[in-house]
Image (cartoon, rainbow, N blue to C red):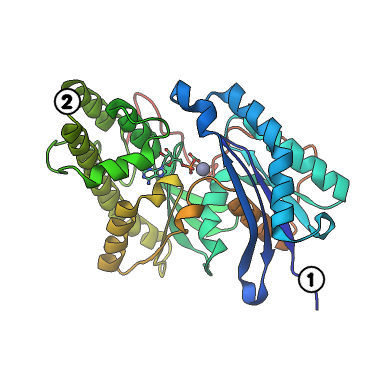
Amino acid sequence: MKKKPIILGIETSCDETAASIIQQNKDENVKILSNIVSSQIDVHKEFGGVVPELAARSHAEKIDLITKKAISESGIKIKDIDAVAATAGPGLIVCLSVGFNFGKAIAASLKKPFIAVNHLEGHALSPKLNSKLNYPYLLLLISGGHSQFLSVENLGKYKRLGTTIDDAVGEAFDKTAKLIGIEFPGGPQIEEYAKQGDPNKFNLPKPIINRGGCNLSFAGLKTAVLTISKKIKTKKEKFDLAASFQKTIEEILYKKSKIAFKEFRKINNNGNKFVVAGGVAANKKIRKVLENLCKEENFESIFPPVNLCGDNAAMIAMVGLEKFKKKQFNKLDYPAKPRWALDENAVFLKGAGVKL
Ligand code: KG4
Ligand code: ZN
């Protein structure tokens, strides 16, 4: 029997050093043999955000060890690897370079194909790690740096339907957390605070909710949170602000996803699959709200498991596996790409003067 392909994935685009081994299984399923993620929270905590040079140094210190661990935990031998996939972008260039160059070196030494992966495509394909998923599907990608609706037509083929015109959802979660006094990275903690607060206490704005199609905007919401955060003192008020913020995000994503469903159906007649991926997709309330919307609109809702929503290398290996099957390999002089949109034809929609 022909050997099922084994892919090594490597990810260092931001503040997680990650390596993973996956294998194509029988009946087209995929098996994660190992998935090691080393977070740098302790490195950046005292600065309240990611410091690129410190992140890069930490990646350089750990990438060798993390990759060795991924190989030993998987139970395979390094020579069994069929291809090496590494994140080429988008992300911080000093961070990307560490894992990208390390991946090239392994591929060269093993004389195996090298595959450059778009980090966002990793999030887009992450549900394929635990379930079968055919193209096309509508994707809501919500992470720390990106918030977009994309029609995923095929591997490498994306049409952007909507994007944020200012901040990303994850960024809004992190900023709100910081203003409430929660330590970096605060996004996940907002969800916990929200459970203890009154979601109707503060009336927060939902920018461009009635215009701009399924484009998104969070800057005005962030400013409103800033203004209120200066006036509140008690823990109870902090819980209330977190709950009001969480509820506002849920309402924005509900309404904008509904618009995106219409636009997706216009271009994909029978399309009825909705994937929500990226770090913010770990938020249980957001999952619930979007699941309910899918029931109302006859869409099938698909979420990656919570542990595969945030940055990891299994999703990078997943893209690597799909590209491997299509023999889409890259030369070793392929550059890292700090800016790399999934839909390279989409117009830039950021900053003052944007017309929606
Ligand atoms: O995908 P990801 O790990 O990294 C990027 O590619 O950006 O996403 C990280 C983002 C952060 O902004 C983090 O606060 C947010 O995802 N996040 C959450 C939750 N878990 C992570 N936001 C809201 N609720 C959560 N449970
Ligand atoms: Zn990410």
Residue 251 position in % (x across, y down): 23, 48
Report whether 38 appears left or right of 237.
right
| Residue displayed at 66% across by 26% down | 57
Residue 190: x percent and y percent? 31, 40
Category of crowding for the residue at label 1, using alpha-carbon neighbours closer than 10 angstroms: few (below 14), some (14–19), many (at least 20):
few
Q: Residue at x 58, y 53 (%)?
A: 315
User: Residue 3 has which mark?
Assistant: 1
Would you call the spot at circle 2 few (<14 residues within 10 Å), some (14-19), or many (20 or more)? some
Callout 1 amino acid: Lys
Q: Is residue 136 left or right of residue 269?
A: right
Residue in view at x 41 percent, y 70 percent: 270
**Tag shown at residue 214:** none
**SS for tag 2?**
loop
Q: Residue at x 34, y 36 (%)?
A: 173
Q: Nearer the viewer, residue 11 or 323?
A: 11
Q: Kindly identify which residue carries mark 2.
A: 232
Residue 99 image offset from top left, x and y in percent: 69, 38
Side (left or right) of 245 relative to 62: left
Could you tell me the amino acid type at mark 2? Ile
Tell me if I can see residue 292 in this picture: yes
Quadrant where the N terminus is found in the figure: bottom right
Q: Are marks 1 and 2 in contact (CB under 8 Å)?
A: no
Looking at the rendered image, the quarter that the C terminus falls into is: top left
Q: Position of residue 6 (x, y in %)?
A: 73, 61
